[in-house]
Image (cartoon, grey):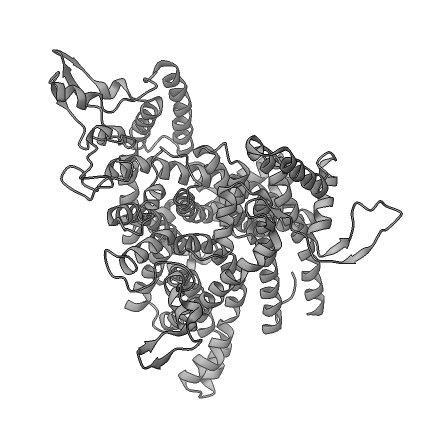
Amino acid sequence: MSEMAVTPIEKSSPEARDELPATSRPWLEQIWLDTIGRATAKLGLVWIAIITAVAVFAPFIANSFPILAKIDGRWSSPLLHYITPADVTLIAVSAIALALWPFKRVGFRVKCLSIAGSAVIISIVTLIVIHPPKAEVFDRYRTLAKEGRLEKAIYAPIPYSANDRLRDQFKVDNPHPRAPSREHLAGTNPNGADVLSHLIHACRIAMAVGFISTSISMLIGVIIGGLMGYYASWVDLLGMRLVEIFGSMPTMFLLIMFVAAFPDYRSIYLIMAIIGVVSWTGDARFVRAEFLKLRHQDFVQAAIASGLPLRSVLFRHILPNALAPLLVSASFGIAGAILLESTLSFLGLGIPLGEASWGQLLTDAVGSGGSFKWWLAIYPGLAIFLTVLAYNLIGEAIRDALDPKLRKRD
Amino acid sequence: MIHYIIRRLLLTIPTMIGITVLVFLVMALSPGGLAAGLRNESGNMRPEARKKIEDYYKKRYGLDRPLHEQYLRWMNQVLPIGFKEPDAGFPKNISFGLKTPDLGESLLLKRPVIDVIVEALPVTVTLNLITVPIIYAVSITTGIYAARRRGALFDNAWGTTSLALWSIPSMWAGVMLLGFLASREYVQFFPPGGQHDTLAMQMPFLPRLAEDGFQRGWLLDAAWHLVLPVICLTYAGFAFLSKLMRASMLENLSSDFARTARAKGLSEHVVLFRHVLSNSLLPLITMAANIIPGLFGGSIIVESIFGLNGMGKLMLAATYSKDRELIMSETLVVGIIAVVCLLIADLLYVVADPRVSYE
């Protein structure tokens, strides 16, 4: 925290400084406390925490493979046998993040860097060490149970994987999609996959898309907006044309054009990159405005006069002062990215078939015959809605916390 | 003011050119390139058919030429002004002037793209023309109401409600409305899709009471089909505009001119509706330009759910069948419409508010 907190005091006007409590908390910390003081923001944070936890532990919550199984008198753990490098990395990194969080003396930057560093190292190590079987035969343990060879088995709370098509349970008189029952709490989709398991595994995609595409769009936005605001004059004029080109095009059309340009190469990473590339203009606009305002301030002039390189002036001296409004845009950006991804998946242009996504489930709600499967509409729709709403509420709360007019009233 | 208008008009030109460059480059540099349509179908195509498409691409883009020449050649055909016969050879029959823009030939529909777009555009524009006034009416009303009772129950409740409405994915709203209000399982109150009833052409234009009961008529039938799509397009727009309206009302309510008006002894009603309101509406003009591109984008989802044959559905069909000519031209047309909307909104703002100046 210390790193970022020192400079912004200069920015706040004399009145704003007077309002700070006597202890005079760092500005960013004050904003954070103001934000989570609001009930709506608290609700949003709780929901995101739940979704994150579900995303991290998805394979342990919903999995067709038993956690422990006794086959022909021998104990084994099929779940761990089939676990992927991504699962292990996610769990390990979130464990590290949770362990580091309580240490107040460790700087925010050190925390971030160590989490990012450990993520890279762990993912490389797991990729080398862990080799799950290429083909997942979901029926295997159910078949073994039928044959009586599976003597004991402890399953995850939901004993179906997201891609488990339940071929062995196909019945002519009870075809998929099936309505919710005790067996499938949220029903099944037309392929016979369990909807609840799908919802749980799709949290990962939603979270990943939200964070990665927003990071990409903010990176582009900050660099272009920063250069525009710092240099002004013709760089600004040129940059604003670029912003206008990307900003005035309807996002969905731009998005679909990019997706259509790569018809045979669709992957979740491509979708993330495309969403990032089409939605940076908002960030660029107000980073530019902030930089235009700040570039004549004394501390910036001092930084330039002392011969610091451009990179340092832009990102170390000016950017921290524009950081808090960026948080608002990040929060709204994540909500927007999740919405865009689920819309693309709904239209069949998003992530490849077979991967779990909330938008994909919605596609099958209205069948070709005009029949309506309510469980395929309500549950995934609610998941998208609540997640998007949570991020929007947090964004709104940060924006209110930043607004000096509102603060005066409190 | 005239200075501003000229400058604004001139700045639109690079944006327009930029959009064409963006659309062209994305398609030209993507895997498969401009002629990807040729590659996709080449497996099951008769040699003469293949030759025909090859010639088409060669004539349209000059695929053996460098990239910038391909772009200029394409621009020459897409623009409404240019050389009429690009292959006529330079010194001989060169004729420069106005012509109908040639947006290419759709491989999917085997028709000129411009015809297809001319058919689809009115549907999307109609949707927008109905949606925009509704969004504005609701936002302005709620904005005024929230600003007058700042901090009261309605203000806070509407703030959260509109944010929640904004967070509802429009495909979810569409699927739910369709499922619960237009399906056989639940209430079949609305038609499940399409623009008209199958018998619409035999209906009289206006609704009337005939001997055999009430007849809907062509107009009411069309409106009936548009109810659910319009609901899907409107609700998300309230949050932003209403918040803006509220903020601008609050600012003007505490301004000097409002105080002067009150000091003159004008009633609160007159102050509010004659002095404050007209000033508070100004920022909403510019927002029309931000909303219309969003609505065009939203129409992709709504049109695909409700089966309306507009620009959005056309774009999806083109994407599914990898018809690059259609995708390119359509993105271009939509982009240019959006830029023109932006321009009109900016110009209207200058006309409405003489205080605006560039810088």
Q: Nearer the viewer, residue A110 or A155?
A: A155
Instruction: Please determine whether, in this image, residue A240 is positioned above or below residue B283.
Output: above
Position above or below: A247 against A180: below
The number of numbered badges drawn on the structure is 0
Q: Quadrant of the C terminus of chain B?
A: bottom right
Residue B288 in the image: state x and y as whole percent: 52, 64
Q: Quadrant of the N terminus of chain B?
A: bottom right
**Residue B150: image x %, image y %?**
35, 69
* Nearer to me, B79 or B142: B79
Q: Position of residue A249 (x, y in %)?
A: 56, 52
Q: Is residue B236 above or below residue B104?
A: below
User: Is residue A297 visible in the rendered structure shown here?
Assistant: no
Question: In the figure, is residue B92 to the left or right of A292?
Answer: right
| Drawn side of residue B173 relative to residue A277, left or right | left
Residue B124 is situated, as x and y percent measured from the top left of the image, at 50, 60
Nearest the eye: B344 or B120: B120
| Residue found at x 40% / y 42% | A345
The residue lying at 71 percent from left, 69 percent from top is B2
